[in-house]
């Protein structure tokens, strides 16, 4: 129909952020269709009633938001894809003594390409999400930038999104603070305006990662890592453990009853030997890291100076970076804890240049 605004698909998780993003577009006069992904069968778990990212309650909340806004709502079943690309990777990483980041994997494999394919199938060219990040064009094409609210910025999790799709994605909340988003949701009368946020991984709502890994591994016919020794960096055996999947580099709490009373941190994990090494914090830190499976959101280069962020809440550290194919070596200006398997994201100011995963 001539004169109509372009059709936009809003990805709705059931939370207040994605709901507010959709509502603001409707208020601005856009034609909006809501889409919710069914990612994980949470029936019989805390996720089914606690308001988690992929629980049944969230699908109902998203449906209620669309009814309130008067827009269509579709549910896309991506549970099989999510299980293969995200849950399986999560389990395998912990069994290998690494620390995975399932949100990054979900953004890489699930949240953008499949939804964009479905958006285009119904005649939409733009996908909108409730992420706190910004896509800006400063003369060299669209780029990914940090969100205005430093406490909510999610650009660290988004480096793995398809670079070719940056121009087809919008983040309406990128220039807002969380309080402003909540105020908009209340002002617009959204039924989930006061819904609380979940800080845990959506498919592990109780936060027991080791328990989830153990149950998932056994379900897949995998044997769990064997119990073994906790060894001090000086060679002394200081305790026992029930499997390396219970630990991550830099961990201080939950080390069990050690024979030493000093403050100790996990410094290395050897799944082949079933050994967990502990020592002072500085022994868990590294001043040089290798980044594998490097993905670019800017023009690739052979070397660069950039800031490297190795944790969601971590402070970016200046570094000199050498590139070799899809691997990078980052020499950090100061040592930090960098757990294998976690994301390492390269920034130039607020712009995301590239990112990958910390290699062992």
Image (cartoon, grey):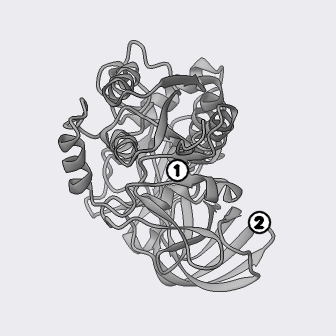
Q: Which mark is residue 326?
A: 2
Between residue 248 and residue 321, name the one nearer to us: 321
N-terminal label among 1 and 2: 1
Q: Quadrant of the N terminus?
A: top right
In the image: residue 315, left or right of residue 333:
left
Q: In this view of the protein, can residue 267 be seen by the observer? A: no
Sort mark 1 into few (<14), some (14-19) or many (20+) by Cα contacts within 10 Å: many
Q: Position of residue 148 (x, y in %)?
A: 35, 67
Q: Residue at x 44, y 19 (%)?
A: 42
Q: Residue visible at 41% across and 54% down? A: 172
Horizontal side, residue 98 vs residue 55: left or right: right
Give the labeled residue for mark 1: 99
The answer to whether residue 142 is above or below residue 168 is below
Residue 128 shows up from this direction: yes
Q: Nearer the viewer, residue 189 or 232?
A: 189
Tell me: residue 296, above or below residue 216.
Answer: below
Which callout, 1 or 2, points to the residue nearer the camera? 2
Mark 1, secondary structure of its residue: loop
Q: Position of residue 233 (x, y in %)?
A: 48, 66
Judge by depth and name the residue closer to the eye, 180 or 41.
180
**Observer-nearest of 337 and 177:** 177
């Amino acid at each position: 129909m001539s004169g109509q605004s372009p059709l936009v698909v809003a990805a709705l998780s059931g939370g207040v952020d994605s709901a507010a993003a959709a509502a603001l577009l409707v208020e601005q006069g856009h034609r909006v269709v809501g889409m919710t992904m069914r990612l994980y069968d949470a029936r019989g778990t805390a996720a089914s009633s606690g308001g988690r990212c992929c629980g049944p309650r969230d699908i109902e909340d998203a449906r209620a938001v669309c009814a309130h806004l008067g827009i269509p709502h579709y549910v896309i079943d991506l549970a099989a894809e999510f299980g293969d690309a995200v849950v399986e990777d999560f389990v395998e990483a912990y069994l290998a003594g690494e620390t995975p980041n399932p949100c990054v994997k979900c953004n890489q494999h699930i949240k953008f390409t499949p939804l964009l394919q479905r958006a285009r199938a119904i005649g939409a060219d733009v996908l909108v999400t409730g992420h706190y990040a910004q896509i800006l064009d400063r003369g060299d094409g669209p780029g990914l930038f940090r969100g205005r609210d430093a406490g909510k910025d999610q650009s660290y999790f988004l480096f793995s999104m398809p670079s070719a799709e940056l121009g087809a994605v919008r983040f309406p909340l990128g220039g807002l603070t969380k309080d402003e988003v909540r105020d908009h949701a209340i002002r617009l009368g959204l039924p989930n305006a006061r819904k609380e946020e979940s800080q845990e991984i959506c498919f592990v709502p109780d936060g027991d990662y080791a328990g989830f890994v153990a149950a998932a591994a056994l379900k897949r016919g995998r044997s769990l890592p064997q119990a073994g020794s906790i060894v001090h960096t000086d060679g002394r055996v200081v305790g026992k453990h029930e499997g390396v999947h219970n630990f991550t580099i830099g961990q201080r709490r939950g080390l069990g009853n050690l024979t030493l009373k000093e403050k100790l941190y996990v410094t290395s994990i050897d799944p082949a030997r079933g050994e967990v090494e502990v020592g002072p914090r500085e022994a868990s830190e590294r001043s040089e890291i290798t980044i594998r499976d490097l993905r670019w959101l800017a023009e690739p280069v052979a070397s660069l100076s950039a800031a490297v962020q190795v944790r969601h809440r971590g402070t970016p550290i200046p570094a000199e970076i050498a590139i070799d194919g899809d691997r990078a070596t980052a020499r950090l200006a100061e040592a930090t804890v960098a757990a294998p398997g976690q994301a390492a994201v390269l920034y130039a100011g607020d712009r995301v240049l590239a990112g990958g995963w910390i290699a062992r």
